[in-house]
Image: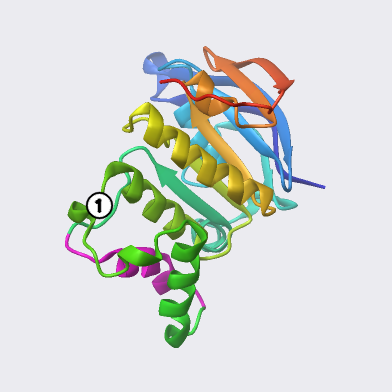
Amino acid sequence: MALIEVNSVTKAYGESELVTQVLHGVSFAIEEGEFVSIMGPSGSGKSTLLHILGLLDRPTTGTYTFAGENTATMTDEALAITRNQNIGFVFQAFHLLARTSVLENVMLPLYYSNVPKKEYASMAKAALAHVNMSHRLGHMPSQLSGGERQRVAIARALVNNPKVIFADEPTGNLDSKTGQAVMNTIDALHKSGRTIVVITHETTAAAFAQRIIQIGDGRIASDQKTDTTHTHYHK
């Protein structure tokens, strides 16, 4: 059974004559354990698609089934719970709290979970160890490099042990060497069994995926398996 199944999904904003159609009948499925990249230029609809996949928005028409459940039948509260328990997000701008330590930043999603409070620190430390950031527990984000901040953001996405991690332009604010290191970290998560969906316009970041879905003008332009024997990352 596919973890993610999108069937004839459309998304429109606005009303009557001012409707802007962003997605036009998008369909695909992502299996558990896959590493998929969704590529497209700015304005192609990939961010809108990410919001739907991440349960941050609903499609206008069509169906989105996540882990076997039709999201259209879920209340906003149920969507929020599913999002917190099953989805991890990594963003281009990191979205770390500036006045909060690395450890506390990674613990944040646990405050909205059913995890006992006494386990927060140990789970956050385990997630940070996973991305080789244990030596920065007490640091503030301002004391970290861009690559280190993104690795902390990846640890935060990991801490709830989600079914899927969505990374939105994860190398967008990084130089090529740091981007390579961040993609290597994401690749390692996939090799440990994670389902990864990377949204990017960078071909070298996308090349880490097993499969690339190209989106253009709100439609799927292509959906192809890749040769993942990548060796170089170029910005």
Q: Is residue 96 left or right of residue 78?
A: left
User: Residue drawn at (67%, 54%), measured in percent from left and top?
Assistant: 192
User: Residue drawn at (59%, 42%), measured in percent from left and top?
Assistant: 187
Viewer-nearest residue: 143 or 59:
143
Viewer-nearest residue: 164 or 141:
141
Image quarter of residue 102: bottom left
Image coordinates of residue 161 in percent, x first then y, are: 58, 63
Q: What stretch is highlighted in magenta?
A: 99-114
Asked if residue 127 is among those painted magenta in the image, a careful observer would answer: no
Asked if residue 108 is among those painted magenta in the image, a careful observer would answer: yes
Image coordinates of residue 56 in percent, x first then y, are: 46, 45
Image coordinates of residue 234 in percent, x first then y, are: 45, 20
For residue 131, say whether it is visible: yes
Viewer-nearest residue: 226 or 29:
226
Viewer-nearest residue: 25 or 53:
53
Image quarter of residue 152: bottom left
Query: In the image, is residue 92 above or below residue 165?
Result: above
User: Residue drawn at (33%, 29%), measured in percent from left and top?
Assistant: 175
Query: In the image, is residue 48 above or below residue 152?
Result: above
Name the residue type under label 1.
Leu
Q: Name the residue under label 1.
A: 144
Residue lying farthest right?
1
For residue 169, say whether it is visible: no
